[in-house]
Amino acid sequence: MTEKDAYSVLMERHGYPSSERYRRILEYLLTPQQARIAAELPASPEELAQKLT
């Protein structure tokens, strides 16, 4: 993720783009790496490996 962090991408995708509470929930449930992976889905394992390395 470059211009937006993964948590922001997930927040927008789930319909809560400006909810600080939802961001805290995501940060509690997902590590930054897990959030980056979730933000890139759907993708094949090969595509994820290319994007995240």
Image (cartoon, rainbow, N blue to C red):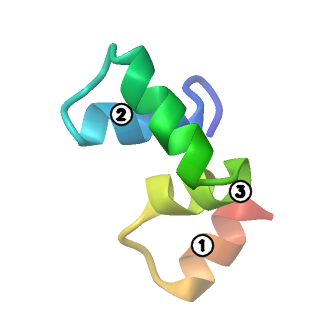
Instruction: Report the side of 5 relative to 43 (left or right).
Output: right
Q: Is residue 41 left or right of residue 15?
A: right
Residue 33, disc = 3
Report the residue that reaches farthest toward the right: 53
Report the disc number at residue 48. 1
Q: CA distance from mark 2 to mark 3?
A: 16 Å
Residue on which disc 2 sits: 11
Q: Judge by depth and name the residue closer to the eye, 48 or 37.
A: 37
The image quadrant where one finds the C terminus is bottom right
Name which residue lies at 60% across and 85% down.
46
Secondary structure beneath label 2: helix
Q: Position of residue 45 (x, y in %)?
A: 56, 86
* Numbered tag placed on residue 9 in the rendering: none
Element marked by disc 3: helix
Residue 28: % across, % down: 59, 44
Position of 14 with respect to 2 (left or right) is left
Identify which residue, 52 or 17, lies in the foreground: 17
The residue under the point 38% across, 30% down is 22
Establish if 14 lies above or below 43.
Answer: above
